[in-house]
Image (spheres, coloured by chain):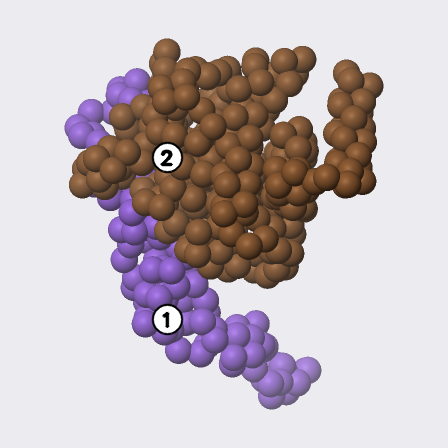
Chain colours: A purple, B brown
Amino acid sequence: MEGGWDWELHNAPAPVRYVDLIPQQWSARLMARVVVDVMLKPEILDPAGQAVTRALLGLGVEGVAGVRIGKRVEIEFDGEPDLDAAQDIADRLLANPVIEDFSVRAE
Amino acid sequence: MTVGRVSIERSDALRRVSIERSEARSELAVSELTARIGVVTFPGSLDDRDAVRAVTRVGAEPVSLWHGEDDLHGVDAVVLPGGFSYGDYLRCGAIARFSPVMSVVIAGAEGGLPVLGICNGFQILCESHLLPGALTRNQHLHFRNRDQRLRIETTATAWTAGFQAGAEITVPVKNGEGCYVADPSTLARLEGEGRVVARYLGGNPNGSLRDIAGIANDRGNVVGLMPHPEHAIDSLTGPSQDGLGFFASVLRHLLGTSTAGAR
């Protein structure tokens, strides 16, 4: 200590970064996210969106012509994001094609 | 109230026993004994008990069906009751549609099995593509719970055959997502083929297109109805007994088919 050189301190292993403690498969899973946006079709009335539009007018917000409200669904895949599977999931369950459109993208 | 109900059910039971014991069974009585109507319970169903009571009240035998079982237990007709199946998550009826019991209900309906979907049941039928269109959020965003006048628009279905054409009835309506929508060509087809089963009178409670309260499939065995006939079977607890007409109709329909067939 007396020589001004802290041997112990400078030869110590690099401090642990918590990010390195995350197992590889976890961080890979975080990457495999597919987002499905589900929106009411344009011709279907969206009363909730209209209510928000009116509320914005009440708040004095200008320049808003309309608001439409949909759903965002995040699908986590094991491993690689599977857009085809997400498309199938959205088509079968997440959206009702009678009233809703959807779009699928990896994130 | 309880005493009255019990005594009615008891007298029904006694009547059935006496019919069973009677030596000279009429065809009608035999058929009446064999009409078994299933009522499905999903997690979140609310009106299954009232539907069972309505089935009992018209003299049919109620059979409780469970959402997790792909078995209809040989019933002659099925009621999908109101409520909030699977919490109405995602969309009303969207998850119930994929339950095991629905696989057999859908197969049965395609083969002519009478199926009545009430409120949430109507939503499940639309999600199952047994009926066209969809039910969306009430236009005014409020849950509506009131006695509602309806006009029966067709008697050419298994569930309305016992009504008089154009009959006006009053049954409760209670929904948050009862606004029926379909594209113009579907609406035109429903109107043209006489498949609008009931229409709201005296004010549309949810913004349904063309005041539609109920529709049928092209064969007339599958009917979806937003209002609740099972809550209008007793003048003590409902606005009328008009709701019995739907259950009596299907019973009559079943008697007709069973006396014609080799049951």
The residue sitting at the front extreme is B24
Q: Is any part of residue B89 visible from this angle?
A: no
Instruction: Describe the element under mark 1 as helix, strand or loop.
Output: helix
Q: Position of residue A93 (x, y in %)?
A: 41, 57
Q: Are marks 2 and 1 in contact (CB under 8 Å)?
A: no
Please tell me the numbered disc located at residue B156: 2
The crowding category of the residue bearing disc 2, from other C-alpha atoms within 10 Å (few below 14, some 14 to 19, many at least 20), is: some
Give the residue drawn at x 32%, y 65%: A87
Please tell me the numbered disc located at residue A85: 1
- Between the C-alphas of marks 2 and 1, the distance is 43 Å
Specify the quadrant that holds the N terminus of chain B.
top right
Please tell me the numbered disc located at residue B122: none
Q: Does A5 appear above or below A18?
A: below
Q: Amino acid at mark 2?
A: Ala
Q: Position of residue A7 (x, y in %)?
A: 63, 87
Q: Is any part of residue B126 visible from this angle?
A: yes
Q: Amino acid at mark 1?
A: Ala
Q: Which is nearer the eye, A14 or A27?
A: A27
Q: Position of residue B137 (x, y in %)?
A: 39, 32
Viewed as shown, does residue A59 lie left or right of B128? left
The crowding category of the residue bearing disc 1, from other C-alpha atoms within 10 Å (few below 14, some 14 to 19, many at least 20), is: few
Q: Which is nearer the eye, B14 or A8?
A: B14
Q: Which is nearer the eye, B202 or B91?
A: B202
Q: Nearer the viewer, mark 2 or mark 1?
A: 2
Chain to which the residue tagged by mark 1 belongs: A
Give the residue drawn at x 39%, y 78%: A80
Viewed as shown, does residue A34 lie left or right of B37? left
